Image (spheres, rainbow, N blue to C red):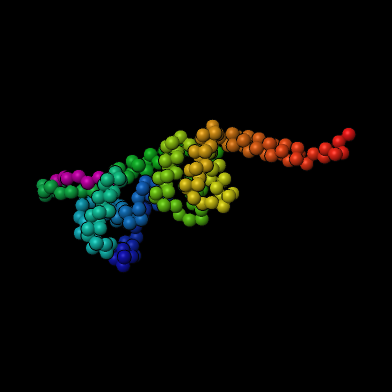
Amino acid sequence: MEELEKLLKDRPIILPRYLFNYYLRLGITAEELIILIFIIDRGDKTVYDPEAISNALGLDKYKVMELLNNLNEKKIISISVEKNSDGKSEEYISLDLLYKKITNLLIDRQDDDKDLDNNDIFSIFENEFGRTISSMECQIIKGWIDDNFSHELIMEALKEAIYNGVTSLRYIEKILYDWRKKGYKNKKDIMDAKNKYRESKKEVKDVFYYDWLNDD
């Protein structure tokens, strides 16, 4: 990684902030992000040259090829064959797919539930967990949203887990599907159910402690 450090020192790279904000939920790993940083620095339509990237970043050539292939399969980049200025066919890397995906995420974020006050649901999980969530965890959370769990309900499930001292997505998922079985769709449904439960417990307690002997 010394070569990467030297590259950063010699040529300061200006990166769009959203790349760091969204790379996890795009399913991009930290190693793949390094490759993307290199490509962005080189500019769009970068020549597909794993060996050059390998030399610049100090990574194994075949590892670079694997990471580029991963990004291509995830539709983060595209690789096409075009003719260069000399008329020879050459492979180029395009970042158009990356920018389109990020644009869609930005649009989706604008449509987020107002109950979140425009805060990022992934950032809230990270704040509550006290750590950076993995790309796999991001996909799980995204899966809940795709499964029509509202942000409001997900936040309530997160609060329930934190209240019980648990920071596990599996635990939160169990809460969500349990609530779905019971027909809870929002915070009001949950609060009504909790209040009803408290009232039932109170009634049982009152009956248990009723002083029958001194009843006139």
Find residue 93 and report its horizontal and vertical position in percent: 23, 48
Find residue 39 and report its horizontal and vertical position in percent: 28, 53
For image coordinates 44% across by 44% down, the residue present is 141
The quarter in which the C terminus is drawn is top right
- Which quadrant of the view contains residue 1? bottom left
For image coordinates 22% across by 46% down, the residue present is 79
Q: How many marks?
A: 0
Residue found at the far top of this picture: 183
Residue 41 visible:
no
For image coordinates 36% across by 55% down, the residue present is 30
Find residue 49 and report its horizontal and vertical position in percent: 20, 55
Magenta stretch: helix, strand or loop mostly: strand
Residue found at the far bottom of this picture: 2
Q: Nearer the viewer, residue 23 or 129?
A: 129
- Which quadrant of the view contains residue 156? top right
Residue 67 visible:
yes
Q: Nearer the viewer, residue 184 or 131?
A: 184
Residue 190 covered by magenta stretch: no
Residue found at the far left of this picture: 87
Residue found at the far front of this picture: 213
> In the image, which residues are magenta?
77-83
Q: Is residue 201 left or right of residue 215?
A: left
**Position above or below: 128 against 110:** below
For image coordinates 87% across by 39% down, the residue present is 214
Find residue 144 and report its horizontal and vertical position in percent: 45, 40
**Position above or below: 63 against 195:** below
Q: Nearer the viewer, residue 193 or 203?
A: 203
Residue 80 covered by magenta stretch: yes
Q: Is residue 14 left or right of residue 128?
A: left
